[in-house]
């Protein structure tokens, strides 16, 4: 029989590979353990056969759902007690994946909305891919929690997409950040109390490209990592509580 200490987190990854590494890194960094054995077991399927989610949602691209379900079932069969998925846009397909699995599957968007509510943010700006924004997945979740969600204008959104796809996903170690800084300033001017880094590549972009924000940042990757540790009963380091 498994103990609470060694219960297993399953990461449905590959969307993208660096973002998957970042999610796993957060779990390791947040766990409060003096040794290897105090960390939860983590299974990762970095399934890069999963087709682009934004292209599927907006342009009729290849359906990513079959590979996502295949990965979820592989993790479940491998012994995962709870599943997580770091890709924000992929949560468009979350309800369908849930139909096939029998273990708890944490919803990163719901966890982020609850974190915003806990911090008292009544209005937040969303930085995300076109697919995430136009699918409405964040808007519905935040509306359900009574939080206003603001999105960038067309030019700002274009700048974000370029940084995500041509910057982080392309492995660029530097990127001009002026346009994204202007997006944040504009959202603050419209009344946003915080900004959600609603694409898994964005925490990496803000760290690697040293983007400064006039708004507090809600990092769904960090929020999900913390929620996953709590779900398997792992202790969390005091600085992350």
Image (tube, helix red, strand yellow):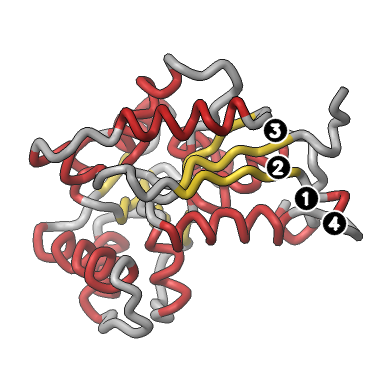
Q: Nearer the viewer, mark 3 or mark 4?
A: 4
Q: Position of residue 63 (x, y in %)?
A: 22, 33
Please indicate whether residue 188 sits to the left or right of residue 159 in the image. Answer: right
On residue 36, which mark appears? 4
**At 59% across and 23% down in the image, what residue appears?**
104
Q: Is residue 105 above or below residue 19?
A: above
The spot of residue 186 in percent (x, y) is 23, 65
Contact, CB < 8 Å: mark 2 with mark 3?
yes
Identify the residue at horizontal 41%, vertical 42% (top origin): 122
Q: Is residue 80 above or below residue 15?
A: above
x and y percentages locating residue 236 in the rendered image: 78, 50
In the picture, the disc for residue 73 is none
Q: CA distance from mark 1 to mark 2?
A: 7 Å
Q: Is residue 29 visible?
A: yes
| Callout 1: SS | loop
Q: Which residue is mark 2?
A: 229
User: Disc 3 to disc 4, how far (Cα)?
Assistant: 19 Å
Q: Which residue is mark 1?
A: 236
């Amino acid at each position: 029989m498994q103990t609470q200490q060694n219960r297993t987190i399953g990461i449905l990854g590959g969307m993208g590979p660096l973002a998957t590494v970042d999610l796993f890194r957060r779990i390791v960094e947040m766990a409060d353990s003096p040794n290897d054995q105090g960390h939860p077991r983590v299974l990762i399927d970095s399934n890069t056969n999963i087709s682009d989610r934004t292209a599927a949602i907006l342009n009729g691209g290849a359906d990513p759902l079959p590979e996502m379900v295949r990965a979820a079932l592989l993790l479940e069969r491998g012994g995962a007690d709870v599943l997580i998925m770091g890709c924000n846009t992929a949560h468009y397909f979350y309800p369908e994946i849930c139909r096939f699995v029998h273990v708890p599957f944490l919803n990163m968007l719901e966890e982020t909305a609850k974190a915003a509510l806990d911090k008292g943010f009544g209005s937040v700006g969303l930085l995300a891919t076109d697919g995430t924004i136009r699918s409405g997945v964040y808007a519905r979740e935040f509306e359900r929690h009574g939080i206003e969600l603001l999105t960038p204008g067309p030019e700002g959104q274009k700048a974000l997409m370029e940084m995500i796809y041509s910057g982080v996903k392309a492995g660029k170690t530097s990127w001009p950040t002026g346009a994204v800084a202007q997006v944040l300033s504009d959202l603050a001017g419209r009344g946003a109390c915080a900004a959600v880094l609603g694409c898994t590549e964005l925490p990496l972009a803000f760290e690697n490209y040293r983007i400064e924000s006039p708004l507090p940042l809600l990092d769904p990757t960090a929020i999900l990592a913390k929620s996953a540790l709590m779900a398997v009963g792992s202790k969390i380091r005091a600085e992350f509580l």
